[in-house]
Amino acid sequence: MRQLEPKKINKVLALLGFCILIGIFYFWNHQQATQLKADVVESVAPNSSKVNAVLSGDTTLAKVAVENVQKLDEVQFRNWIQLESKSLNNSAVNTEEKQIQLKALAQNLTSAQNKKLIEVALDSDADANARILSIFLLTLGSRPENISLLLEAAKKEIPDLGPLNPHSAAELKRGQELALRMMAVDELFERARQNPEALQQLQRLSSEAGASEIRNYAQRKLKELR
């Protein structure tokens, strides 16, 4: 099993910080967040400390055990992604401990849950934090389909966001879209050192990615492997 990279989650946290810049355009409103918490409460044992944590808004404590995450249905799992992603904004997060926790979880997700991750990651209307966490979990997973899902994430064409005026919401949103895809490219690059399939997919990205910036980025990564 590949060793955890100590700074890997720090990159994710940095991207989360970037997304704060566009939060006023894309984050939930209060009503959505309240409904989400109610949905997640239904997926954990009643009267437990986890339920109390969710109800109090303390998302750092509202953790669902790995084995319980596997049992969540499609709607509950998507809600869990949303709630868990919010905890990454907590300044008190122990990044090393958090990555270990997420690594263990990612290694045990089902194929159906991995497909849900890519669905969330590619949903340009979804919460930014949830999209980042979804990509991150895919980079940590080791199921056979993870490599092809990372290719799908990086290859996806960026939607038309309108005029990319300097400092506009459209420009910031495109930056986020590129950063998400680069996370997938970076993981394929790391795996390509020892995995022929990952190398093949990285090569495909260099010519097939929907965004020219991603094609160029994949080309640079391929040169680093030579």
Image (spheres, grey):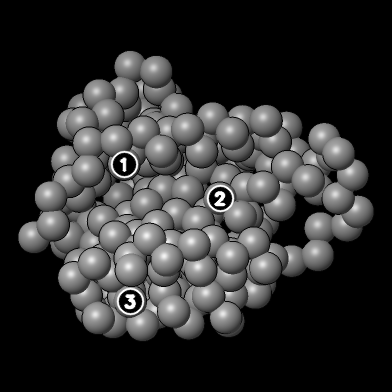
Reading the chain from its start, which is encountered first: label 3 or label 2? Answer: 2
Q: Characterize the local packing of mark 3: few (<14), some (14-19) or many (20 or more) Cα atoms within 10 angstroms.
A: many
Q: Quadrant of residue 11?
A: top left
Residue tagged by mark 1?
8
> Residue 85 at what x, y percent from top left?
42, 41
Query: What's the CA distance linking mark 1 and mark 3?
Result: 20 Å
> Residue 92 at what x, y percent from top left?
33, 17
Q: Quadrant of residue 77?
A: bottom left
Reading the chain from its start, which is encountered first: label 1 or label 3? Answer: 1
> Residue 28 at what x, y percent from top left?
63, 39
Q: Amino acid at mark 2?
A: Ala
Instruction: Tell me the mark number nearer the camera, choosing from 1 and 3.
Output: 3
Relative vertical location of residue 130 with respect to residue 138 in this rendering, above or below:
above
Q: Residue at 59%, 65% (x, y): give it.
A: 216
Q: Characterize the local packing of mark 1: few (<14), some (14-19) or many (20 or more) Cα atoms within 10 angstroms.
A: some
Q: Nearer the viewer, residue 138 or 222?
A: 222
Q: Residue at 26%, 56% (x, y): give it.
A: 140
Q: Residue at 78%, 46% (x, y): give it.
A: 171
Query: What's the CA distance linking mark 1 and mark 2?
Result: 14 Å
Q: Nearer the viewer, residue 27 or 141?
A: 141
Q: Decide: marks 1, 2 in contact (CB < 8 A)? A: no
For numbered disc 1, what is the local secondary structure? helix
Reading the chain from its start, which is encountered first: label 1 or label 2? Answer: 1
Apparent side of residue 20 relative to residue 191 in the rendered image (left or right) = right
Residue tagged by mark 2?
179
Residue tagged by mark 3?
199
Q: Is residue 139 visible?
A: yes
